[in-house]
Image: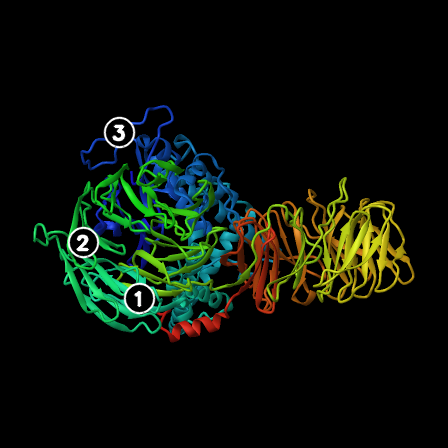
Amino acid sequence: IHRDLKPSNVMVVELGGQLFPKLLDFGIAKVCGEIADPMSEPEDVPDPDKVETVRMRIVPDHEPRTKTGPRVERLTRSGSGMGSAPYMSPEQWSSAWTVGPPTDIYSLGVVTYEVLTGRRPFNATRTNDYYPLHARAEVPPLGGELSPELDRVIRRALAKKPDERHPDVMALAAELRIVLRAQLREQLRSSAQQWEDRSREPGLLWAGGALADLERWTRQFPPGELSELECSFVAASQRRARRVRWARRSLPVLAALIVLGGMLLRSMTRADMAEQAATESEAERGQQALLHGESNDAVRHLERAYQRGDHSAGVAFMLARALQPRMAELGRLTSSSGRMWSAMFAPDGKRILTTDDNSARMWDAQSSQLLFTMNHGDTVYHAVFSPDGSRIITAGGDGTVRIWNAATGAPMRELTDQRTRAKRWRYYAVAMSSHFVAAIDLMGRMAHVWDADTGTQIAELDNDGSGLAMLAFSADGRWLATSGSTEVRVFEASTWRRAATIAGPRVRSLAFDPTSPQLVIGTYDGIASIWEIPGGKRVRSLREAGESVDAVAFSRDGLLVAAASRDGTEQVWDATSGGLRTQFNSHHNKIYWVEFDPSGSRMISAGADGAVVVSNVATGMAIARLEGPKSLVTVAHFDRDAHRVGGASWDGTARVWDAGSPYQRWGSPTIGPECDTMDSLVPDQRFIALSCRNHGTRVWDTARGELFADLPSVTTAGDDYYSAFPASTTSGDRAAIARGNTVEVYALPSGQLLRTIAHAAAVNTVAFAPGGHDLVSGAIDGSLLITRDDRDGLALPASTAGIDAVLILPDGRVVAADANSRLRVIDPERSTVLADVPAPSRVRLFRPSPDGSRLVTISTRGKQTPPALWALDQFRLIGQLEGHSGRVFTARFVAGGRQILTAGADGTARLWDAATGSPGQVFRGDSHFLADATLAPDGLLVVAGGSDGLLRFWDVSNGRLSWMLPAHKSYVVGLHYEGSDLVTRGFAGDVSRWTLPLAAKVIETCHANACASATPGEQ
């Protein structure tokens, strides 16, 4: 039983000109124990497909938890499960000791599902989240053009109960053959009928390989299974094949020439087809890698497709997005030998200090030029600057701690264990206060303290020595905390007596509060807590269980504390109350380091995936993902202004990156859940008016990134009417807000109230004319008023029911929809009704074409009626845009009014012909719903946002999902282009502006800087 079937364990080999899959990696039976020695940490780097094989503790449903002894075994321990979470069967999670052949059937079913659809049946962000999906979630249909019969076979392979699956692989293969045979049977029936319908045209007969397959399959059919027409078709195909063979035998010379020419043509065609297939394969593999956040793999495959000649807009766009993280690299520093252990900016930010397997080195932070080298002759694990920045302290594997002149690199003092006079300690970490230097050995057995000015050894501090060394001074230098993993010992610097002992067990990380005598500690068992010093009392319990907490940090003001887990989860708490502020996972892999910027608004994390991620502390959103290293990044630091980030990797490099977002130009803070609207009066444009309960109406100028005006909130009309949307003119100089029975009109940006328009009942809808100040308003009593500048409102013919939506067309006509599902077109100059027609349902939104000749109406909330397309020049319903499953949230005319783009609750965006309403391309994603969609200015991409806060980009030419960009913590409910920039609106009232650099420019720049032609480390 393999128990770890997944794509990375299946390799394809060529034998005799044919491709055969081979199953590899039968090593899962080995025990995967943790190795605390930092020299062994590369084992945490994931396999190439980013799906790790892990050992998980399994709690049986009805059995007590058992403990395993220290004895090393060659087989998987009882009560533990191993495998790759996306591919593990339910029994591997709940009862690992009962797995049998059906377990491999399940995993093979997941792999087959992924091969057929390009996606896995279940996806989760955390390892443990896969269990309920595998155990209880329904398998999504294969979809597309795949047959229901094939879907049934895969569903059986993915059955939750082992006895409901195929008993073995041969049974699965046999059932697949039956499905394939049924498909060939249907092809035969269809081809025979088409041959008959076209007067038995010879060109429709089968030949060559298709005929050979047909003859082989028909021999297996029982007598009488084929119809008379099908038998005639097979016989005619065979006769034609015999005539062709006879002709070739009769005319050998001609046949030879034909064969020769055919071979040449076939060879050329095959070569072209093979090249095209290889190019398409590279593009598809690059696309999948990009969508899964594997940018190094994405660059490799997309670069190959691009070099093979696929310069299509879609491939160029994906390649540019994959290359973009590398554009943030400002400098690359190389080690003098082996791995890079640390990298940090000098206090003035002008230089960078690095350590490697042989020395410490100083670099110019701007030019990346080497300034000087400080040799140890052995690994330099750690280095720090003195508090005043004048000295450098290094800790080496040669048994010395050395002090250097920070300006010149000249040695100043060598510190050793003066009591034994032996260099037997491999110093792993060093810390410095204003008066003392402290260092701890690699295994955490012993810490030594020296006077920073004289070099005299002051103290020798015993530790538990459990294999993971840590030490840190408090900000005031009064306390020194050390740990070898089993416990934390705190010493008072005035006497060097132990002041407190904090039991772990298995401490993984610690950090002092910069503002008070407090210590945060993280353990292997997933516990994170804050402890008072010197009392040793726990004052805050941040978390009590979970993955190992491998990194912790306080913000500079001591108000926030962060912890990072082995599964990549990052959490930020209020250090005073212990309340969780935010939680996110940008790495999905082990994290070695976390650090706040000076303001406490951003945080960096360095991980085993070779990336450094800059995150927004308030929202948890990734601001920038900084990539390049081929191996894990052990540490990363902001510079003093937090404009740059420096990180050290075991690939032998340290990198300096721009810490800013490569795409986001600005973003407003969230307002709150009170901005709970999924709709807008018109598709978002430059001036966006947002009404949030208890927060007023805020008008944004998205071109400048400014809060343009802060106005009163819209009031609700009550009953089954929804709140009126606030309206603003396209020029941004007026805003109108429904307030009870009135409409208040304000000047922008001053916010001055210009006039009040009164109705006899609550106002439910308002709208400005396109490009002007004319305003139409409707109330729940059916009244309609049109108001022009400096003139009294003019009453239009009222409706017999309350007004749901109003609109002024470019030619001045007014369109209104009421609660009786009536749609009326009114001439305001003559105050006459031009048309009064029934609508399929009550209307919530109007979406007119640019010239006003077409109109799309969208139903009210809770209704799943398809949008309706109207011809306003003829006052008739063209048809309904049927295709979405569930509610449609929005629609807009695109491509100069020739097409309509819709987005809905089924997670799809769809294009329609604006003249006829006929459906076009469908754009599918994994979002629960899409709230808005638009077309890029060049017409090459469809962009949509929805429930998961991601922006999705599809290639219009083929409907392929090309890229996803995290945009908002909440739903993305609105978006629009301003020039080449994209502006998005979140469900919580936050607005952001994004710039996507032109693909050609990114590719050209990256090629010029040699960042694209090879993955990092291969250049």
Q: Is residue 630 visible?
A: no
> Looking at the image, is mark 2 or mark 3 earlier in the sequence?
3
Q: Image quadrant of residue 322?
A: bottom left
2 or 3: mark nearer the eye: 2
Q: Image quadrant of residue 286?
A: bottom left
The residue at 39%/30% (across/down) is 163
From what the image shows, is residue 632 above or below residue 771? above
Tell me the CA gap for discs 2 and 1: 25 Å
SS assignment at label 1:
strand
SS assignment at label 2:
strand
Residue 26 point in image, percent of width and height: 26, 44
Residue 611 point in image, percent of width and height: 36, 57
Crowd around label 2: few <14 · some 14–19 · many ≥20 (10 Å) = many
Q: Amino acid at mark 2?
A: Trp
Name the residue tied to disc 1. 352
Labelled disc at residue 67: 3
Name the residue tied to disc 2. 450
Q: Is residue 642 visible?
A: yes
1 or 3: mark nearer the eye: 1
Q: Residue 853 vs residue 383: left or right? A: right
Closer-to-camera residue (152/87):
87
Tell me the CA gap for discs 2 and 3: 44 Å
Closer-to-camera residue (552/124):
552
Report the quarter where the N terminus lies. Answer: top left
Crowd around label 3: few <14 · some 14–19 · many ≥20 (10 Å) = few
Residues at circles 2 and 1 in contact by the CB criterion of under 8 Å: no
> Looking at the image, is mark 2 or mark 1 earlier in the sequence?
1
Q: Residue furthest bottom?
A: 1008
Q: Residue furthest left?
A: 421
Tell me the CA gap for discs 1 and 3: 48 Å
From what the image shows, is residue 221 above or below residue 731? above
Q: Amino acid at mark 3?
A: Lys
